[in-house]
Image (spheres, rainbow, N blue to C red):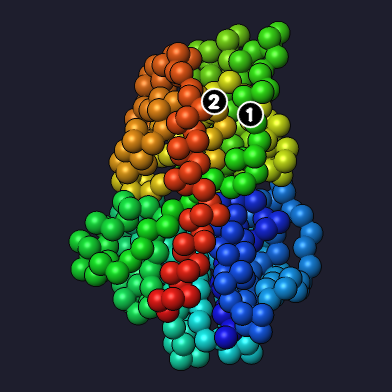
Amino acid sequence: MKIVFFTFYYPPDLCAGSFRAISLAKELSKKIGRNDELHIITTHPNRYIEFREKAKDFELISNVRIHRIKVPSHRSSMISQIPSFAVYAFLAFIKCKKIRPNLIIGTSSRLMTGVLAGISAYKMNCKYFIDLRDIFSETISELLSRKVRFLGRVSEAIFNLLEKRLLEGASGVNVVSEGFYNYFRIKGINTSNWTFFPNGVDREFIDTKFDDDKPKSNSLKVIMYAGNIGSGQGLEKVLPSVAKKLEGIYHFLVIGGGGASYKLVNAIRNKNVKNIEILPPVSREKLIKYYQEASILFLHLNDISAFKRVLPSKIFEYSVIGKPIVAGLSGYSAKFMNDNVPHAALFNPGDASGFLNAIKEAENLIIKNKDISVFVEEYSRQKIMDAMAKHILSNT
């Protein structure tokens, strides 16, 4: 059997999609035969301009073959990523055609990797499985509508059609958030056979004893954000104004990069904020050290209706570190946090006053090791991907 797995991001790239992809690939590799082949068709690291590790064009690891395609550099914006994906899709299709797979898997947050999987499967007369990590049609249409309403409506119509054809033709569909189901049911898509295998907690965070390392007593307490700085996060809406009010009390550390970094930088300059430090993306080993020095972990999603359905992967990472969490969330992700993470203080996205109150609440939260152990047991990434790999191989 030959399996082709399309994923635009793959380690050493740093992002939620790459970590999920390698975890699934490892579990698939364990379950296929020695003579079977798993082909990962991905890109050379390109997620962040600030973090570009070198990787080989081709790697053979047991029964896994990793094919990396060089794509044009981009700034993480929608427009700048179009040429990058076009190059990837064209060359990935050619590689896939030479392999002649029996099964194609596509993991996709911005839809088009999934479309690539669907078109390739159609051309090669094989089944395909979609791992859906975001609702692209709703997200892009709302973002565009805020600029030009007509563009938003046109894009929604186009991407709705693509999503419907892609998902109805798949032999299996998985979603990373249960909040996705209702959206697609309203669109008339049958989701009764879909699965829910979310993101999870990776081994690096389970094995690290974070509570043994406390912030230095002679330094300011640290509120830390780690992750993408894009329009989806909207950090510029709450972080500078709140940081300004907490000068001399808290130091705010932001580690990451993305297409909206300039908005955050401009807001910091305009408000003359002195206690926000922005660092480029770092490896997970270095990130863990920063987590150990943090007092509070911060998470925020922009006030967009599409984000009421998502379940950010960062939640799983933050939840086992043993530090209070302050999160600007709504909808399904807020419910998930309330149900599963007692050491989190929530506020409405974009609400700076709510952010301040949540920080005060977080200072008094009690963190219980038992709660973290229960969360790890339920949401271990390896456990989740093991079950997902079994499902893919037995049902497609």
Q: Position of residue 133 (x, y in %)?
A: 44, 58
The local secondary structure at tag 2 comes to loop
Dot 1 amino acid type: Phe
Quickly name the residue at label 1. Answer: 210
Quarter of the C terminus within the rendering: bottom left
Horizontal side of 374 relative to 273 (left or right) equals: left
Horizontal side of 357 relative to 108 (left or right) equals: left
Q: Check the image and report above or below for 70 versus 203.
A: below
Residue sitting nearer the eye, 265 or 5: 5
Label 2–label 1 contact, CB within 8 A: yes
Mark drawn on residue 323: 2
- At 71% from the left and 32% from the top, the residue drawn is 289
Q: Earlier in the sequence, mark 2 or mark 1?
A: 1
Q: Check the image and report above or below for 186 versus 260.
A: below
The local secondary structure at tag 1 comes to helix
Dot 2 amino acid type: Lys
Q: Position of residue 222 (x, y in %)?
A: 61, 20
Quarter of the N terminus within the rendering: bottom right
Give the image quarter of residue 302.
Answer: top left
Mark 2 vs mark 1, CA separation in Å: 8 Å
Q: Position of residue 101 (x, y in %)?
A: 56, 86
Residue sitting nearer the eye, 81 or 40: 40
Q: Position of residue 272 (x, y in %)?
A: 59, 19
Callout 2 crowding tier (Cα within 10 Å): few <14, some 14–19, many ≥20: many
- At 66% from the left and 23% from the top, the residue drawn is 212
